[in-house]
Image (tube, grey):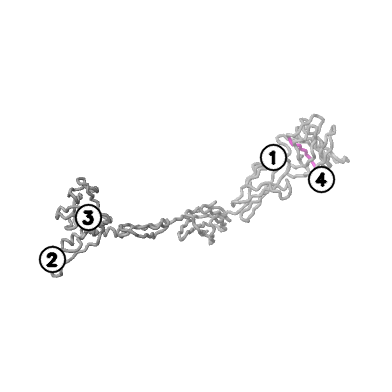
Amino acid sequence: MSGTIPGSVAMSDQHDTSGKICPKCNAVSHYSDDFCVECGARLPSETVCPSCGEKIPPGEKFCSSCGASVAPSPGVVPQIVQPAVEYPPEAAIPAQGNGPKKYLVPAIIAVVIIAVIAAVVIGGTPAQMKSNGVQSSTATPTTIPQTAASTSPTATYSATTTFTTQATTAPASTIRAGFTVDKASGSIPLTVSFTDTSTGSPSQWYWDFGDGTHSTENNPVHTFKAEGSFTVTLNVDKNGQTSSKSQVITASSVPLVADFVADKTSGTAPLLVTFTDASTGEPTTWVWEIPEIGAAGHIFSQSNILRMNFNDPGTFTVQLTVGKDGVKSKTTKTINVYPTSSTTTLVTTTVPITTTSVATSEFNNGNVYTVYNSPTKPTVVTFTVPVKIISITDYHWNNGMGASPGQIALKHSDGTLYGWWSASGQPGSGGVPNAYWTVNPSVNIKAGTYTVLDSDSSTWAQNSQSGNAGMTRIIYQPV
């Protein structure tokens, strides 16, 4: 057999004499070889000194006996070369395969050596390397830096080596659709605000409201005008990635009807009343008005609750207007405020009516005793026949300070109200300004029992002689 021995190491022309002695054929191989270059047998781990023949342990570069160097000569670089086998002429090969096996053994050895070298040096058998995506080359890779999202890295090779490359794929960005609503049910027209809560930073939104309408806003507001259950679906997209989320919105047909309740509907001044909305149809706006107080169109509240303190006696109309999505509804209630804080005991004076030539008659519960403010009982007078009221005068001593004139009225026991009439002021005893409030209505009223109403009961005079009722003088005549 001639040529290169399978699995041999090709050396430069300056062959180094140091190496390992084959235990089978006594041939000398390179100190880095694991197999004999002549017969292919496995070599011992010791190295033989080229000067004195002593065995040198692996890793040592100098002989411990003579000091000679056992390192390979400069410039000698072992290289794995493709094995070549010289075969005899075709006639020399036995036809039946039972002849001499002179050439068969070296060929088998060469194959075994190649497989072992591939497994040890490269890292696996050719089949394993192929299945693991390992590539073999005789160049040193210089990897070109790639971006995080690159899936096709490249490399440049410049020296003798074996290398492995592996392609990596950047994880795909994921998005997940999501949204919230400010209400999921209500009466029509039902307005719902939708807020996108999707993750993954979507770049496009498509809302299907389930009633035939759509939107591409990220946070739309939609009004459901028909009764029913509607499946709202949000579809989001980012670079071709999509996700969706759905929720059911229920719209009922409860109509919008204004209504409210009051914690009290009558009482003496000052009277604090709390009004609370009780409308159906889920209104979104409220307007409270009291025409008898303030300028026309004055709004006292725009919330669903109104708290009102009625300081003056009288009959007041409280009006509530509710609205939703352009639809409105209105309702009213009446509040009666009396001028005193108690009606437990009535001081009643019956005025006799005569049909003589006397032009007028008088009701007067005033007296000359010490007076106090704020009557605790109402001033009540009964007329047995219809009369004409000529004048009414209330006494406002107010600790000698008088009071700015207000209004006076009469209220029948059946609720009929006469007045309010604006009073003029006259001085009282000692020159007290506006001690007397006088009105001159000249109005005919029906027979019955009446309560005198005064707009400022806090300064209206009273004492025990008046029955703690406000002091009043009424001039009238029968009709």
For badge 1, the amino acid type reads: Leu
Residue on which disc 1 sits: 271
Image height of 464 relative to 242, above or below: above
Whole-number angstrom distance, CA of label 3 to CA of label 1: 123 Å
Characterize the local packing of mark 2: few (<14), some (14-19) or many (20 or more) Cα atoms within 10 angstroms: few
The spot of residue 292 in percent (x, y) is 73, 46
Kindly report which numbered mark, 1 or 2, lies closer to the viewer in this rendering: 2
Kindly report which numbered mark, 4 or 1, lies closer to the viewer in this rendering: 1
Q: In the rendered structure, does residue 273 fall within the stretch colored magenta? A: no
The picture quadrant where one finds residue 78 is bottom left
Kindly report which numbered mark, 3 or 4, lies closer to the viewer in this rendering: 3
Whole-number angstrom distance, CA of label 2 to CA of label 4: 150 Å
Kindly report which numbered mark, 2 or 3, lies closer to the viewer in this rendering: 3
For badge 2, the amino acid type reads: Gly
Residue on which disc 2 sits: 97
For badge 3, the amino acid type reads: Asp
Q: Secondary structure at mark 2?
A: loop
The picture quadrant where one finds residue 344 is top right
Q: Is residue 95 left or right of residue 358?
A: left
Residue on which disc 4 sits: 443
| Mark nearer the N terminus (2 vs 4) | 2
Asked whether the viewer can see residue 301, the reply is yes
